Structures are given as structure tokens and as C-alpha cells.
Image: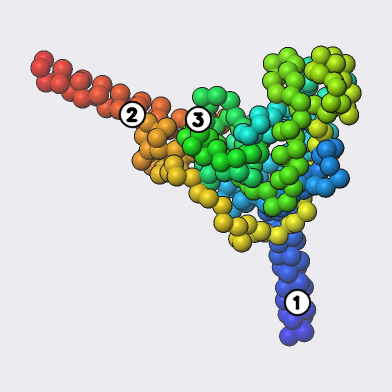
């Protein structure tokens, strides 16, 4: 009898160990935080350490695109010297214009860190705080006075630990316009101009050959000391206080929003209007 119980308990224990081990393996994969971005511009790669513990939703969003191979063979579609280099949203299909890549649903804004030189941040639509999807940009200089305060703050979710010089090389290329896009970095001979790029080839673009997870540790940002944004988000709704109509609103983004749009302010206004209507009805009733 004792032997049967022992065997049964042993099998149960081994099963639990197996489940726990599998769970830990999955967790390590899901929280991988160092990625390598290989471009056609250099034999070296850009290595980026992601802030998985402090901007978790943005990092998870970025890793989902990587897992799907979304960025493979996309092109860097925008560069502004002494400002930013942007990619993640377009590919080249053999002729102009560039082909827009289909994004997933928008992700919540997480304006924790400052847009200083060497950081990577999410691009988004103007006047739409929670509109970031697949596009990101590298800061070529300290843009904190602008991007930390604009459009609810732009989410910085990682920093370059190797390869900043590659990003700086991209911004030195000739920049051309095509369709609705401006400042597309183009690889061409010194004597060539944008007018010669009416029928470019893949070799004329800065191609993102692949983005790969190279460190699958749960937390790899513990040794980093990123600069925090000077613009606080007191209620953690993804909107910095100076751009938030109700900076102390206790309603969290995930409880109030749908499809990436913060509705905390709208709900608060609705509540105030309803209270006013109730108060007015009471007064009218008393007058009667």
C-alpha cells in the first residue's frame, strides 16, 4: 500500500516539475529583451536592449512583430538628420510607391523614459496618443524637450547597446521623396540624384534583413540606467499629465479603452454631465 502511494506521489511530483519547467521556458522566451537588427548597410548588427519590465506592453507588441517575421526585408523609410531614423512600416515591392505593411491593433502608450540619443521609441499618428503599431524610430540626439512632451509623450522602449554608428550612417545618406513619404534614405553613387531613382532596386534601400532575439533572459535591463521622462503620468493611463485633461483620474487605460484610444476623459465628462442632469431634475421637481 505504501509503495503504491509513493509511486503515485512520485509520478505526480514529476508531472508538476515537468509543467513548471515548461512554464519557465515559455516565460524566458516571452520576456526576451535583447534583439539584433541586421541591415543591408553594414556587416555588423544593431543590438537593442528592451525595457521589458517597465514598458511591458510595448515590448510585447514589438516581440510579436518579430515572431511573425514582420520586419524581415522591410526598409528604413524615413530619416531626418540630427533627429530620428524610422522604420518598421514599409517594404519595397519592385516599384514606387513603397508598400505599407499591415499592422496589428494599436498598443497603449507607455511614456516612462526620455527620448534621448540612442533610444528606440514607437512612432504614432499625430494627435492620437494610443496609436502606435508597427513603426519605431531611433533618436539621433536628445529629443526629450520635443518628443517627451508631444502627443502624450512618445514611448521609449529600449536603447542601443551596440551599433549606434550604423544608425548615424543611415542619416548621412541622400534622402528622397516618393508618394506621401519624405526623407527616404537611399544608397546611391555620389554623382547620382533622387531623379535617378525613378526605377530603384532593392540595393538602393536600407533593408532590414532580419530582427532576431539574441538573449532570452527574463530581465536583461537591470544593469541599464535609462533617463526617465521629466513629464510624469500620474494616473498611469499612458498620457503625460500636461496633455491629460484629468491627470489624477484613477481609471486605468485597460479598463476604459478599446482599440488603443484612451476614453478616460470622455467617461469622466459623461459622469459629470449625468450628475448635473440629475441635480437639475431634483431642483425642477422641488419647484413643482
Q: Is residue 273 left or right of residue 22?
A: left
Q: Residues within 10 Å of mark 1 (few under 14, many from 20)?
A: few
Farthest-out residue, left: 287
On the image, the x and y values in percent for residue 284 come to 15, 17
273 or 94, nearer to the observer: 94
Q: Which residue is mark 1?
A: 10
Residue that appears at 56% across and 52% down: 226
The secondary structure type at the circle numbered 1 is: helix
- Foreground mark, 1 or 2, reads 2
The secondary structure type at the circle numbered 3 is: helix
Which mark sits nearer the N-terminus, 3 or 2? 3
- Foreground mark, 1 or 3, reads 3
- The circle on residue 151 is 3
Q: Is residue 250 left or right of residue 182?
A: left
Q: Is residue 102 visible?
A: no
82 or 61, nearer to the observer: 82
Which mark sits nearer the N-terminus, 1 or 3? 1
Q: Which residue is mark 2?
A: 271
Amino acid at each position: 500500500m505504501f509503495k503504491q502511494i509513493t509511486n503515485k506521489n512520485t509520478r505526480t511530483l514529476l508531472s508538476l516539475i515537468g509543467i513548471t519547467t515548461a512554464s519557465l521556458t515559455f516565460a524566458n522566451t516571452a520576456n526576451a529583451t535583447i534583439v539584433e537588427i541586421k541591415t543591408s548597410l553594414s556587416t555588423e548588427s544593431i543590438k537593442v536592449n528592451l525595457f521589458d519590465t517597465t514598458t511591458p506592453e510595448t515590448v510585447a507588441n514589438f516581440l510579436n512583430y518579430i515572431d511573425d517575421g514582420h520586419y524581415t526585408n522591410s526598409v528604413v523609410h524615413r530619416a531626418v538628420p540630427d533627429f530620428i531614423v524610422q522604420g518598421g512600416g514599409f517594404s519595397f515591392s519592385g516599384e514606387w510607391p513603397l508598400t505599407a505593411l499591415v499592422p496589428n491593433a494599436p498598443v497603449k502608450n507607455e511614456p516612462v523614459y526620455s527620448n534621448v540619443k540612442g533610444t528606440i521609441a514607437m512612432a504614432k499618428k499625430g494627435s492620437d496618443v494610443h496609436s502606435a503599431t508597427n513603426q519605431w524610430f531611433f533618436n539621433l540626439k536628445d529629443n526629450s524637450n520635443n518628443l517627451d512632451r508631444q502627443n502624450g509623450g512618445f514611448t521609449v522602449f529600449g536603447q542601443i547597446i551596440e551599433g549606434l554608428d550604423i544608425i548615424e550612417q543611415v542619416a548621412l545618406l541622400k534622402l528622397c521623396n516618393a508618394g506621401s513619404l519624405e526623407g527616404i534614405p537611399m544608397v546611391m553613387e555620389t554623382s547620382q540624384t533622387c531623379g535617378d531613382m525613378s526605377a530603384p532596386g532593392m540595393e538602393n534601400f536600407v533593408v532590414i534583413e532580419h530582427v532576431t532575439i539574441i538573449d532570452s533572459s527574463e530581465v536583461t535591463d537591470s544593469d541599464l540606467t535609462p533617463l526617465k521622462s521629466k513629464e510624469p503620468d500620474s494616473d498611469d493611463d499612458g498620457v503625460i499629465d500636461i496633455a491629460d485633461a484629468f491627470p489624477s483620474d484613477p481609471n486605468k487605460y485597460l479598463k476604459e479603452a478599446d482599440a488603443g484610444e484612451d476614453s478616460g476623459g470622455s467617461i469622466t465628462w459623461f459622469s459629470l454631465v449625468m450628475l448635473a442632469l440629475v441635480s437639475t431634475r431634483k431642483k425642477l421637481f422641488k419647484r413643482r
